[in-house]
Image (spheres, rainbow, N blue to C red):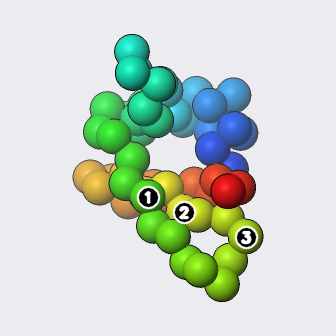
């Protein structure tokens, strides 16, 4: 699982005009999943299921 920063650098993620993270393939806004026991949250594309981790 890549980080959101690496996904932006590699072109897997893009930001829209409101600075929201979007999947480059599906152009869908990523959903956030928080696990209270982890240091990071997981960003998931609702259409293709791509997963990226984001430090809180």
Residue 5's quadrant in the figure? top right
Q: Label for residue 2?
A: none
Q: At 73% from the left edge and 70% from the top edge, which residue is drawn?
A: 39
Q: Is residue 1 visible from the viewing direction of this image?
A: no
Give the spatial CA distance, label 2 vs label 3.
Answer: 10 Å
Drawn side of residue 31 relative to residue 40, left or right: left
Residue placed furthest toward the top: 17
Task: Classify 47 as above or below 5.
Answer: below
**Circle 2 Cα neighbour tier, 10 Å, few/some/many (<14 / 14–19 / ≥20):** many
Q: Quadrant of the N terminus?
A: bottom right
Residue drawn at point x = 57 percent, y = 54 percent = 52
Q: In the image, is 34 to the left or to the right of 2? A: left
**Sequence-first tag of 2 and 1:** 1
Q: Circle 2 sits on which residue?
A: 42
Rendered residue at 52%/34% (across/down): 13
Asked if residue 46 shows in the view, the reply is: yes
Choose between 25 and 8: the one closer to the eye.
Answer: 8
- Please identify the quadrant where the C terminus is shown: bottom right
Alpha-carbon span between mark 1 and mark 3: 14 Å
Labels 1 and 3 touching (C-beta < 8 A): no
| As drawn, 15 above or below 51 | above
Q: Residues within 10 Å of mark 1 (few under 14, many from 20)?
A: some
As rendered, which of 8 and 25 lies closer to the eye? Answer: 8
> Could you tell me residue 14's position as x and y percent?
49, 26
Circles 2 and 1, Cβ within 8 Å, touching? The answer is yes
- Residue that carries the numbered disc 3 in the rendered image: 39
User: Residue shown at 33%/40% (left/top)?
Assistant: 29
> Which label belongs to residue 32?
1
In what element is the residue under mark 2? strand
Answer few, some or many: residues within 10 Å of disc 3's Cα (few below 14, many 20 plus, some between 14 and 19). Answer: few
Q: Quadrant of residue 28?
A: top left
Residue 33: x and y, percent?
Answer: 45, 67
């Amino acid at each position: 699982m890549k980080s959101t920063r690496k996904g932006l650098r590699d072109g897997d993620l893009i930001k829209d005009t409101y600075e929201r993270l979007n999947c480059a393939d599906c152009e869908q806004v990523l959903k956030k999943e928080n696990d209270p026991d982890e240091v990071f949250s997981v960003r998931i594309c609702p259409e293709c299921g791509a997963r990226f981790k984001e430090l809180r």
